[in-house]
Amino acid sequence: MTNGAAAVESATRPGGGSTWRPGGTFAANPTHEVICTLRTTTIRWLKRIALVAGASLITLLAVRVWDTQRGLPLSPWHTHVLQDMEATAIARTDWAGYLRAEQALFDDLRREVTDRLPAADRVPSNRYFDGGPIYPGSFRNDWNRSYTLAPSGPVVGSSGHSRVTQEDWNEATRLAVREAQRGLPPGAPMHLVGFSNGGALAMNYVLDAMAEPTLPRPARGSRRWSRARCRRRSRAMPRRASSPSCRRS
């Protein structure tokens, strides 16, 4: 009796796969069958959903590729690639060398794009058309070129930029600082100003100059203000704040 009771208890325990019947036979557990059916159905529908999603993605990609191929052909200013100076070259040149390289770029642009424009692109709204009112070269000052700001009084600043990578922007900023310092009277302070991306580049240069003694340093405020600035920077940028200039301040 004890063994029989134990067998019945084990067979009817929740989660078991069968039930004990009088006469010594077992019957399948209905709950277990329902769970197995639900699991099978769920897996089947998940596979169907995955197949539909994959087919839809492939279809959308194919339609997008087809749509791009049936569009208008690319214009010369889309396909011609200018070979600009990179960071290593900018670091080895001076302001005059930078302007010469820039002039070579614009000469290449005129030769390969402006002079080769088809008749359909020679319209007033095209900035690459030298006969249009918005062609940069037709203005008294071509603001697409690098330039220096030299007021009638003592020279206090300059500007310069390049094209793509952060390293190129940083080296262009250092070049502009070197040119600005060259035009300053001995002992005159140098201040960096900038708007938009130029403001970020100016701040980044100041941080680099604090860590690299070879870089010309812009004028700073009082020692008390410098210590407060270093404390704020040490909380936000530990590596920068550990520079010798912050420790001396």
Image: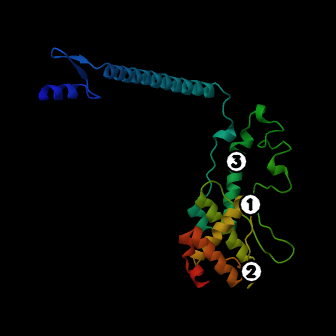
Foreground label between 2 and 1: 2
Residue sitting at x 22%, y 28% = 9
Seen as rendered, the residue at the extreme top is 23
Of pointers 2 and 1, the one earlier in the residue sequence: 1
Q: Amino acid at mark 1?
A: Ser
Seen as rendered, the residue at the extreme front is 1
Location of residue 50 by image quarter? top left
Disc 2 from disc 1: Cα separation = 23 Å
Q: Secondary structure at mark 1?
A: loop
Q: Are discs 2 and 1 less than 8 Å apart at CB? A: no
Residue underneath mark 1: 146
Residue sitting at x 86%, y 55% = 140
The answer to whether 97 is drawn above or below residue 31 in the figure is below
Q: Secondary structure at mark 3?
A: helix
Residue underneath mark 2: 189
Q: Amino acid at mark 3?
A: Leu
Of pointers 3 and 2, the one earlier in the residue sequence: 3
Residue sitting at x 84%, y 50% = 138
Local crowd size for mark 2, using a 10 Å CA cut-off: few (<14), some (14–19), many (≥20)? few
Q: Which is more toward the observer, 216 or 32? A: 32
Q: Secondary structure at mark 2?
A: loop
Residue underneath mark 3: 109
The answer to whether 206 is drawn above or below residue 52 in the figure is below
Residue sitting at x 57%, y 74% = 241
Foreground label between 3 and 1: 1
Tell me residue 152's x, y (percent): 87, 74
The answer to whether 121 is drawn above or below residue 109 in the figure is above
Foreground label between 3 and 2: 2
Tell me residue 237's x, y (percent): 57, 68
